[in-house]
Amino acid sequence: MPSLSIPRFRPSLSFAEAAAFVRGLLPWGDDPIAAFERGFSDGDLDGRPVVLAPSARIALLWLLEALELEPGDEVVTQAFNFPAVPAAIRAAGATPRFVDVAGGSFEADWTLLEQALGPRARVVIVTHLYGNPVDVRPLVELCTSRGVTLVEDCAQGIGASSDRRPVGTFGHGAIFSLGPTKNLTLLGGGAVAVEDGELARRLAARASAHRRKGLPGACALAAKGGFLWAATHPLLFTLLVLPLLRLLESRGVDLVHRVMEERGFELTGVERSLRPSRPMAAVGCAQLRWLAARNRARVRNGWYLRSLLVERGEIGELEVPPMREGSVFMSFPVLHPRRQALARALRARGVDTDFGFMADCSNLDPGAASGAGLPHAARAAREVLHLPVHPLLGKRHLDRIAEAVRAVAGAV
């Protein structure tokens, strides 16, 4: 019997989360929203207050607005980024200033930061991209010496650590994504955590102006989560989903991006956006019980796959960027100059891949303080490809992924 195909990701959902969702529909008992905010704060953020938000991008907007930025103020961030980040900066009334990523990396080249901190720089956003933590302490020292506020983008970094300290606890504030593909999910929404209690109260007041998602909306998210869980089950994925992906790909249609609807180029309808509801928070409470174990599985898988790809010789033009201790391997990104051909070849061998949603934002934002022409960010956006590394994979799956990469990466 042929081997089952390997989906690029699987939602970290189970019947425990489904049962929690149903319990969250009941109007009595402890408030799951307060329980999730408290549990997330105590478990992963050293007690920093947490406020749930409609999304990570809106959480970032709230945080930047709370810093009372003025027109002309600059927010420094890396160019290879999710487009919602500069969109939130512009919506807060500030100007993005981009720095390039380091060559062969997805992390900002921090040697460029000091020269990027001009007289109007007010905020630096540190992005723990793909679960790989930034070495934050030197940046804290630099920002403090220059009177600049440090903010952490932990949308893909929940559970990661830098210098044995949880990410999200270094800066003035941090934002998190809790979407269906994240390692901690409420089926949707985001969160913001801050070090200052008064700021947390202001953010909570801001959040209270937004209604919570109603029952139809919460059920729609639950249905989407269930669909993603079913579609990425190895049997269904092998028999139906991967053949459909390959068929649509041959016709120029990217089904994954259409389903996920990651549109980040501008923030619209912010005031009408809805916060996570009780049943969504109840899912998050169930997730918190398993987060550490699932992250350990990600870490185990990530370092093992890396050893297969890095320590056994070069693989054509494939480049595996560096990762730090403390990474939670939310993804396993690689670089290849012909990524589309590589993706097709891997899917033909039953290994799914994806290009992700990041972009060279300097090329998308001509009004930024630093324009286009950042070569490493452009290369990352052009060549990034994600390999499967989710917690449900075992050693035999990772061996097969590495075998497929080695078989095709040098030939495409």
Image: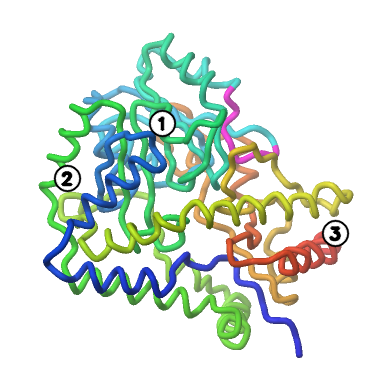
> Magenta-highlighted stretch: main secondary structure?
loop
Q: What residue type is disc 2 on?
A: Ala
Residue 56 left/right relative to 165: left
Q: In this view, does 369 lie above or below 88?
A: above
Q: In x, y percent, where is residue 196?
A: 26, 26
Q: In this view, does 233 lie above or below 336?
A: below
* Label located before the other in sequence (2 or 1): 1
Q: Does the magenta stretch include residue 65?
A: no
What is the CA distance from the residue labelled 2 to the residue labelled 1? 21 Å
What is the CA distance from the residue labelled 1 to the residue labelled 3? 42 Å
- Residue position for label 2: 207
Q: Is mark 3 on a helix, strand or loop?
A: loop
- Residue located at (40% from left, 75% from top): 15
- Residue position for label 1: 169
Q: Is residue 151 above or below residue 44?
A: above
For label 2, count other residues whose C-alpha is less than 10 Å away and answer few (under 14), some (14-19) or many (20+). Answer: some
Image quarter where the N terminus lies is: bottom right
Q: Write the start and end of the magenta stretch as one range.
A: 104-110
- Dots 1 and 3: beta carbons under 8 Å? no
Which numbered marker is on residue 410? 3
Q: Tell me, yes or no, if residue 337 can be seen here.
A: no
Image quarter where the C terminus lies is: bottom right
Q: Which of 362 and 202 is in front in this view?
A: 202
- Residue located at (38% from left, 50% from top): 177
